[in-house]
Amino acid sequence: MFDVAIIGLGAAGYTSSIYTARYKLSTLLIGAEEGGMGVTAAEVGNWPGDIEVAGPDLMERMKAHAKSFSEVTFKQAFVEGVKKTKTGFTLAYQGGGSDEAKTVVFATGSKKRHLGVPGEQEFAGKGVSYCATCDAFFFRGKTVAVVGGGDAAVEGAAIVAQVAKKVYLIHRRNAYRAEPYWVEKLEERENVTFVLERTVKEISGSGKVTGVTLDKPFEGADRLAVDGVFVEIGSDPASELPSQLGCALDAHGFVQVDAAQQSSVPGAFAAGDVSSASNHFAQFATAAGEGAVAANGVFNFLQTKS
């Protein structure tokens, strides 16, 4: 039995494991996808100590740091269930197998929101993408639409604009919620057209994406001819596992935690984008901070049980 199982291979999970290892706690670090949402950030300009670093590179460095400790057992697998036991928790894996731990840290992050419009599911992977950082290269010389108004959308549009012939940035409001830095950077690009106060009603195509239909005309037409659509409208907490365990969630689905990042279930902690802490400010720095606090919470919790 491990002292702690940390579910999630992103900034919160990696940082938490670094701290639990330094506390000399036997640590299971597990998740299905390495890097979490961190790998979708092409440019990180607010990580202390690095004026600029690519998200995937930062995640690789965190992973290497975590795996450098003998106390950390790294496992890539999908956890489909977590149950409370008399001695701690049991993690059940998709495809069979399980592990036990005295405590658990949910660092499961978040999942991308979908538009929920006709054609979106049909053309997923055929022109519809949810990661500009990952897929921009495939639209070199093409015309694309980016949907959203937050940091992810504006940053994504800036990334795609480096390779695409033309980018439409579609946002339902008349102003962007994104960090002004990214908006100003995008406004400098001549191949970006801002489509404000419009929403996408449908994504159409034949085998692959050929256009999007808007809720009202833009420059005289309600349809834009595009070769791809990047959906960047935010994300929701991946709280299925903590919910299954009985952890209390807030109105938006985030795991409610105390000052030690502990949930309503004793011994179960949450950190990063899935937790209610840090004013829901989803950043590398806040995820790492919450991961460290959760590790400290785990250590103190185990001290009371020894």
Image: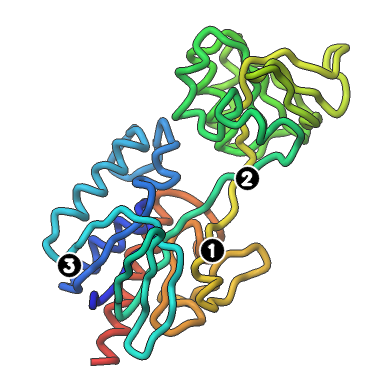
Please name the amino acid that badge 2 sits on.
Answer: Arg
Q: In the rendering, which numbered label is found on residue 239?
A: 1
**Residue located 60% across and 28% down the image:** 128
Mark 3 or mark 2, earlier in chain: 3
Camera-nearest residue between 114 and 300: 114
Answer with the quarter of the image where residue 44 lies. top left
199 vs 119, nearest the viewer: 119
**Vertical comparison of 172 with 244: above or below:** above
In percent of width and height, residue 174 lies at 78, 32
Q: Name the outermost residue toward the left.
A: 70
Residue under label 2: 113
The picture places residue 271, in percent across and down from the top left corner, at: 43, 64
Spatial CA distance of label 3 from label 2 is 36 Å
Query: Mark 3, mark 1: which one is toward the viewer?
Result: 1
* Left or right placement of residue 197 versus residue 268 in this view: right
User: Is residue 32 in view from this perspective?
Assistant: yes
- Measure the C-alpha gap from mark 1 to mark 2: 14 Å
x and y percentages locating residue 24 in the rendered image: 15, 72
Of pointers 1 and 2, the one earlier in the residue sequence: 2
Give the residue pinned by disc 3: 22
Quarter of the N terminus within the rendering? bottom left
The structure residue drawn at horizontal position 53% and vertical position 23%, both measured from the top left corner, is 158
Could you tell whether 68 is left or right of 135 in the image? left
Mark 3 vs mark 2: give the one in front.
Answer: 2
Look at the image and tell me whether residue 148 can be seen: no
